[in-house]
Amino acid sequence: MSTEDIIVNIGRRALDKAARRRFLEICGLNPSAESDPIFRAAMEIERALRPKIAARSVARLRAPAIFDGGALVWDGARFYCADFPANGDCVCAFAYILTVGDFEAPYGGVFESCLADALGTAYAEAALCELKGILGGIAAKVLNEKGSDKKGLCASRVCGPGVSGMDIGELGGLFTLLDAQSIGVALTESGCMLPRKTLAGLIFFDEKDALSGLNKKSARACAGCASRGKNCAYCGARAYTRADGASD
């Protein structure tokens, strides 16, 4: 079963606390250092941009999610990732595109632009976490309606173009599958998503043991990652050898 597109609007209040915490982490700031001029500058940027934040996502459900030849099969399309199983299935998958906007600094120079960019990253990460919870609720409801005996659904790690062993070229397939324009997102000819703070990928749901393969990072996955094991805060690649044979 493949559903039609699902539009999800994520309220900013649900994101503010987590985004603030992540924003300070990215900037290397202590939450209690209110007298720090950099802290004050960061808070000024946050106050200026917060009212403009609108987290929106378009997603689509596939149940069950079928793997064939190392690819996820979806309505005639095939999505490849280094860590997908050769064959098999899981309870369901969601394809999604999520945006929180552009996050252009309203004033200042390079320093303020860096703070605005960090704030956008923090809100995108917080919105993705919230989206996973919302999609998990949808998955549980669908399974309940089908009379499934599956209990305790868990979410997989995110598989996205350019990270986690998925080639950046898979981005086009997601934009073909989903109506990105419905949330104001576009894919440029060069492969950039606009607005800039936009994420896209796949999330799988099943019982914990069934997701063990999808949640296990491997050296194979790092081979398809643009960060080549250097972006460890995001892809957990530090423990693995780089694909070119050099150690991190």
Image: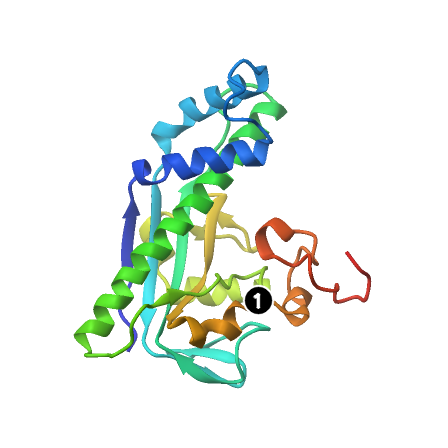
x then y, percent, for residue 236: 61, 57
Comparing 32 with 129, the one in front is 32
Comparing 32 with 203, the one in front is 32
At x 54%, y 13%, the residue is 35
Q: How is the protein colored in the picture?
A: rainbow
* Mark 1, residue position: 166
Q: Quadrant of the C terminus?
A: bottom right
x then y, percent, for residue 42: 52, 23
Residue 220 against residue 191 in the figure, above or below = below
At x 32%, y 68%, the residue is 152
Comparing 61 with 187, the one in front is 61
- Tell me the crowding category of disc 1: few under 14, some 14 to 19, or many 20 or more residues within 10 angstroms, Cα based: many
Say what amino acid the circle numbered 1 marks. Met
Quadrant in which residue 26 is drawn: top right
> For this view, does 33 lie left or right of residue 124?
right
At x 45%, y 72%, the residue is 211
x then y, percent, for residue 160: 51, 61
Comparing 84 with 99, the one in front is 84
Residue 4 appears in the figure: no
